[in-house]
Amino acid sequence: MTDIFVNKIFYIFKIIIKGIRFESPLCSDVLIFDYEGSRVLQETILYNIPHSVLFTRYETFYFSLPIVIRFIRNLIRFKLRDKSFGSITGNIYRLYLLSCIEHIKPKVVITWVDDSKSFHYVSRNYKHAEFYAVSNGFRYEYPVVIPENGYKMSMPNFICYGKFEVDLYKKYGHNIDHYHPVGPVIGSYFMTEKINVPISIKYDICLVSQCESTIIQGLVYPEIRNAITRLDEFLVRYLEEYNLSLCIAVRSKSRVEIEYFKSVYGEKAVFTEKESDWLATYGAMAESDTIVVFDSTAAVEAYSWGKKVLFSNFSGIDRFSIPVSDVCFVKDYNYSIFREKLTAIRNMRPQEYQEKTKDNRDYLVCFSIEHPAHNYVRNLILKALQC
């Protein structure tokens, strides 16, 4: 046990030495909490608004007299509730982040990582800014919303996808002061800022990839791997049967991902240019007649636009089932049922599909051309800056 403790201390020490900066963070009225997703916030919401980014994953450590003084002051007030080493180090790091924010003195703090415990902590302990967590994915009962080890999210403002999420978070007792069910930021930005002309359909089917390398290699989440590989098994058979074109919106374009898809689909598929275009998945979905997916957030966003989507959960585990309309959902691991569902969707006129799914889509995800989510969040920030 002592050796484990010493190794952890040594590991943390190496991280600190690697990321230490003998200076204070720059003061800023608008602060992005966590580098993850900062590009999305910068391009969709914070353009022309001066801001800074606070790294929150041990990448950078500011070491200066003002930060040290604030940290010691916070440490004196700090009371340890959990004596485990992991909790102590996590809480100390959150005190460091709080000390940085006290020095930066922002009026607005925004994050793309809505489930960050560090963000939840600082949002409740720094009283001089408006805090906004922007949902980076559609949430259902799996995997984020059900409290883990009794932990419940607590934050002032949550920018979420729709009324469904509001009801779900309340059901599980999360402590959120203000819900803003205005829809997904990226999807609204793409549809209102990037679509200037009518979209031509280039592909019969778009498969939105969820193939992380570790999943495909069988290192994690075997049940998700089963769902993905079974879907691919049925889809390649369907494409051959009906002689259809396929576009794959890749997740990362890693070697493992591309090789996996080529082993399944051969040369039939066209791959998106993920590395050069962060909106490539949205473009591929828009240019396809029908989208096929396991449970991708991007596909849920396209569903909110009225795009024809078939969600397929072949994992055998109900908690992986997105609560979409029965019109566009299949879970029985049976090719005949899959073929029947997909064919029925493909044969529907877009207007018919939209009418059949409207009530469900409106409840799950808010989408408005007139009042897009990214503009709503930008206006919240501009208003806060005027105070």
Image: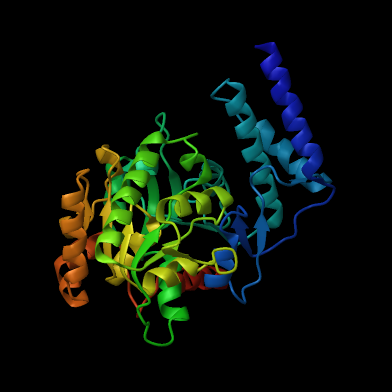
Q: How many marks?
A: 0
Camera-side residue: 40 or 348?
348
Residue 164 seen in the current view: no
Name the spot of residue 317 as percent of width and height, x first: 27, 37
Which residue is drawn at the image coordinates 73% and 36% (left, top)? Answer: 72
Camera-side residue: 230 or 295?
230
Name the spot of residue 216 as percent of width and height, x first: 47, 42
Residue 273 seen in the current view: yes
Colouring mode (rainbow / by chain / secondary structure / one colour)? rainbow
* Res 246 quadrant in image: bottom left
Q: Is residue 122 left or right of residue 325?
A: right
Q: In the displayed structure, would residue 325 be above or below residue 95?
A: below
Q: In the displayed structure, would residue 261 be above or below residue 359?
A: above
Which residue is drawn at the image coordinates 69% and 49% (left, top)? Answer: 100
- Tell which residue pokes out farthest to the top in this image: 1
Camera-side residue: 238 or 25?
238
Name the spot of residue 260 as percent of width and height, x first: 48, 49
Quadrant where the image shows the N terminus: top right
Camera-side residue: 259 or 367?
259
* Res 236 quadrant in image: bottom left
Q: In this view, does 297 lie to the left or right of 79?
A: left
- Tell which residue pokes out farthest to the bottom in this image: 197
Name the spot of residue 284 as percent of width and height, x first: 42, 70
Quadrant where the image shows the C terminus: bottom right
Q: In the displayed structure, would residue 173 be above or below residue 157?
A: above
